[in-house]
Amino acid sequence: MNVETILSQIDLGAMALPEFQRGYVWNRDQVRGLMDSLYRQHPVGGLLVWVTKTELASARGDGQLSAGSVELLLDGQQRITSLYGIIRGKPPEFFEGNKQAFTDLYFNLDDETFEFYGPVKMRDNPAWINVTQLMQEGAGPTIRRLSRITDLDDDVADLYFERVNRIDNIKKIDLHIEKVAGDDKTVDVVVDIFNKVNSGGTKLSKGDLALAKICAEWPDARKAMQKRLTKWEQAGFTFRLEWLLRCINAIITGEAMFTVLANVGPADVQRGLEQSEGGQVIDTLLNLVSSRLGLDHDRVLGSRYSFPLLAHYVVRRGGRLSDARERDKLLYWYVHTFLWGRYAGLTESVLNQDLGLDRRSRRRD
């Protein structure tokens, strides 16, 4: 199936992204590499999709799915999202990430390189063309604009026109699509396939794998967690999904290792999320370090991986600290974690050690 048809399938809701997929993580170098490979007709790999009934599908975003069946992308999200953003000039409905990774991509007709817009280098230089504009208008209007440049000799003009057409023809390149289908392909089976396939590409973290499993059992998990992260971001603190998941893990299991979540059900995860945010534990901790220490913004916040232990500590004590003395002792410990770089290295093992100390001290109490 060619690239343009694949993008049309996304627009029609016939192809989407499963809820358990992570967001867009590519950077500009990866986007430029993809476009350069396609321009030079180098292989970029195929796609893997899960064909499932629409009524059973749990897809990312608010887009309407096509009736009957839908193809959910298991492998190829980063490539297809990049192409969609460049060709359509906007992210797809299921997008979550940094759209600047594929915005304002230009191509130099002289040296055949892709770069992102830089006004000093590109302004008033007709050899730099906007790739998205070319993709949307087609080769014809771009060629007509170039033909009005009077100082182009015939050989250069022919070379430019050939290169413009090669970029426009990227939309016609066929990508092989491998399909996973059948009644035996349950969500658990597909998540396992997804994990195995994607571990060979942009490597999945342990948090990604844990979140994939949780989303397979609780499809709205990512959306629920993202809602909390958005609230804290609006207050000036930017955290990753993996950070919140580690806080939840510490609260419900007392452990730092994501592997323990394999034995945790969706109800427990929901409970941990409610305790972390619904009970205002993390809000309370952020207010504490803001008001008492002056660390009131993401730019000055230190030792963010202390928060799983801090949240565990507060939840285990009924959601609040007993007095100002306990509060100040906790803040004293927190300050020393970033002064001494307590969680700057092997975060999981050190955090797990500290959680173990808190569990033992709590039992003694």
Image: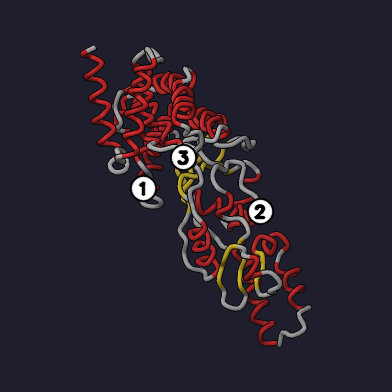
Residue assigned mark 2 = 88
Mark toward the viewer: 1 or 3: 3
Residue assigned mark 3 = 300
Amino acid on which the number 2 mark rests in the picture: Arg
Judge whether residue 337 can be spotted in this image. Answer: yes
Viewed as shown, does residue 287 lie left or right of 54? left
- Disc 1 secondary structure class: loop
Residue assigned mark 1 = 199
> Can you give x and y, in whole percent of width and height, for residue 198 in the image?
40, 47
Judge whether residue 184 can be spotted in this image. Answer: no
The image quarter containing residue 170 is: bottom right
Mark toward the viewer: 2 or 3: 3
Sequence order check, earlier mark of 2 and 3? 2
Residue appearing at x 44%, y 37% in the figure: 301
Viewed as shown, does residue 34 lie left or right of 333? right
The image quarter containing residue 140 is: bottom right
The answer to whether residue 170 is above or below residue 359 is below
Query: Closer to the camera, 88 or 311?
Result: 311
Sequence order check, earlier mark of 2 and 1? 2
Sequence order check, earlier mark of 1 and 3? 1
For disc 1, the neighbor class at 10 Å (few under 14, some 14 to 19, many from 20) is: few
The answer to whether residue 356 is above or below residue 163 is above
Amino acid on which the number 1 mark rests in the picture: Ser
Amino acid on which the number 3 mark rests in the picture: Val
Measured Cα–Cα span from mark 1 to mark 3: 34 Å
Query: Closer to the camera, 290 or 181?
Result: 290
Residue appearing at x 29%, y 43% in the figure: 345
